[in-house]
Amino acid sequence: MPSYLQNYHCNLATSTSQSSTRDPVTNPELEPSFYHQAVQHAHWRAAMFAELSALEMNDTWALTTLPPHKTPIGYEEVYMKPPPGYLSKGDKRVCKLQRSLYGLKQVSRQWNSKFISVLFNMGFSQSKANYSLFTKKEGNSFVALLLYIDDILLASSDIDSIEIVKKSLSAEFKLKDLGLAKFFFSMEIARSKKGISLSQRKYALELISDSGLLAAKSALFPTDTHVKLSKDDGELVDDVLAYRMLIGKLLYLTHTRPDITFAVHHLSQFLDSPRMPHLQAAMRILRYLKSALGQGLLFPTSSKVHIKTFSDSDWASCPDTRRSISGYCIFIGNSLVPWKSKKQHTIS
């Protein structure tokens, strides 16, 4: 099991807060959504300054006056409106791009192609199951590299191999080393002598706060086994989009919370026309999360290498289709790796 993880580039993460204040202007621990919110706090101003400085160092643009026949953002020559707060008040200049800038349609493919070609030259192989994962094995050394847009996560049991990869990538790209990974893609990474743990505590807390359930009573179980949900029972939900967004956020939370996988996947069957019992069941999941916010996955530092598989089925419990819902989980040693809950395609 990899014992050394490191991430790079510009991951901006706030610390977890128990405060019920949801305004980023008054609560600096919340991540702002707009420039006027971020500019109120020194650490966000510093983050914006660091990002703009990196763009200037790479000669990404040159400030110029906008020609009469040009409009900001387009093709060929590209003129971009400057970011808020970059120019002084009254300065009417625009940014003429001299290099590709993320956010433009054509940039993502160019960046990905360039980065992948560099990894291939370094001896990495691309996973067929997850195209964002690259692995390299030489002798007893094994390195895994995970790429998300322009953020990189490296994992290896050999620190020297990490340093070699860092040096090779630095020769091709300008990297910002953030050290040992603590927060990546809304997942919190913690280390101890027992192993590495992954959780989404901050994400779950924000989800509960956005739903207005911070003061609600906790639930001991994610679902009520005595309630059989049907697509035709109960009144229709007024805000269908809100229900779909909530289920989508809960689905992302199942990456580190296998205990809610069955309940969330069951509620995802009613996205087309959700009803009040379905919304109440989703609220129960949030109240269950409130009882154990920091629960997640633990990957022990040492365990016997053997595979254990568990599976189960609820035997035609769906009142609408009479199909069974089957599930499984697989352990490698004491580490839970894959798990799944899915309704069967046919009636058994």
Image (tube, rainbow, N blue to C red):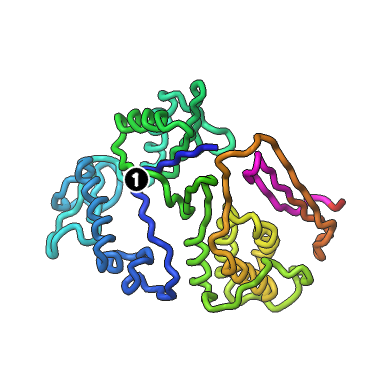
Position of the N terminus, as image quadrant, is: top right
For the point 35% across and 65% down, the residue is 32
In the displayed structure, would residue 36 be above or below residue 327?
below
- Indicate the secondary structure of the residue bearing disc 1: strand
Q: Residues within 10 Å of mark 1 (few under 14, many from 20)?
A: few
For the point 15% across and 55% down, the residue is 93
Image coordinates of residue 8 in percent, x first then y, are 36, 43
Kindly give the residue lying farthest to the right in the view shown. Answer: 348
- Nearer-the-camera pick, 252 or 15: 15
Image coordinates of residue 336 in percent, x first then y, are 64, 46
- Nearer-the-camera pick, 323 or 139: 139
In this picture, which residue range is highlighted in magenta? Answer: 328-346
Q: Which is the main secondary structure of the residues drawn in magenta? A: strand
- Nearer-the-camera pick, 138 or 110: 138
Q: Amino acid at mark 1?
A: Leu
Task: Count how many numbered circles sit on residues in the image.
Answer: 1
> Image check: 104 left or right of 89?
right
**Residue 297 appears in view:** yes
Image coordinates of residue 46 in percent, x first then y, are 24, 57
Is residue 229 located in the magenta-colored stretch of the structure?
no
For the point 16% across and 58% down, the residue is 87
In the displayed structure, would residue 182 be above or below residue 130?
below
> Image check: 343 left or right of 214?
right
The residue that mark 1 highlights is 178
**Residue 337 appears in view:** no
- The image quarter in which residue 41 lies: bottom left
- Nearer-the-camera pick, 143 or 147: 143
Image coordinates of residue 170 in percent, x first then y, are 31, 33
Kindly give the residue lying farthest to the top in the view shown. Answer: 139
